[in-house]
Amino acid sequence: MFLIKESIQSYFQTNKKLKQGETKMAFNDRNMFRGNNFGAPREMHKVVCSDCGVETEVPFKPDPERPVYCRECLPNHRKPRENRY
């Protein structure tokens, strides 16, 4: 019951922010809707994009053996989605 109450409070606090003109949510704010860590912010790790060299943050500890991409470069390395319908 406590988790439901906490989730409802979090929802209304976010709505209040949006109505007050804060139209963009921070990257970490999206986690509260996914049920991860009950709205707690994720630990972010600073990395350098393997393509463009820009410094960015990722919500996971990167493996030094694998490339890491920023938001702009990541779509260039994903497989195209098949038509799901």
Image: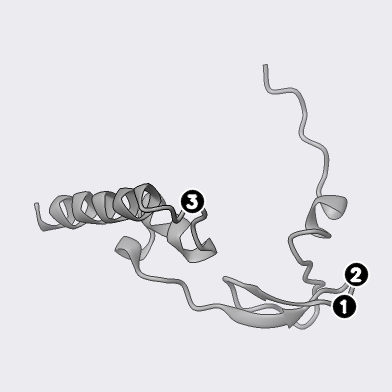
Q: In which quarter of the image is residue 80?
A: top right
Circle nearer the viewer, 1 or 3: 3
Mark 1 Cα shell of 10 Å, populated few (<14), some (14-19), many (≥20):
few
Residue located beneath label 2 in the image: 51
Q: Helix or strand or loop: what does disc 3 sit on? A: loop
Seen as rendered, the residue at the extreme right is: 51
Circle nearer the viewer, 3 or 2: 3
Where in the figure is residue 56, as x and y percent of width and height?
Answer: 71, 75
For the residues bearing labels 1 and 2, Cβ distance under 8 angstroms? yes
| Of residues 8 and 16, the one drawn nearer to the viewer in this rendering | 16
Q: Which of marks 3 and 2 is nearer the N terminus?
A: 3
Q: How many marks?
A: 3
Where in the figure is residue 44, as x and y percent of width and height?
Answer: 55, 78
Residue located beneath label 1 in the image: 53
How much space separates mark 1 and mark 3, taking CA atoms?
Answer: 29 Å
Where in the figure is residue 75, as x and y percent of width and height?
Answer: 80, 51
Where in the figure is residue 22, as x and y percent of width and height?
Answer: 45, 56
What residue lies at 79% left-to-right and 57% top-to-bottom?
A: 74
What residue lies at 36% left-to-right and 47% top-to-bottom?
A: 19
Residue located beneath label 3 in the image: 23
What residue lies at 9% left-to-right and 51% top-to-bottom?
A: 1
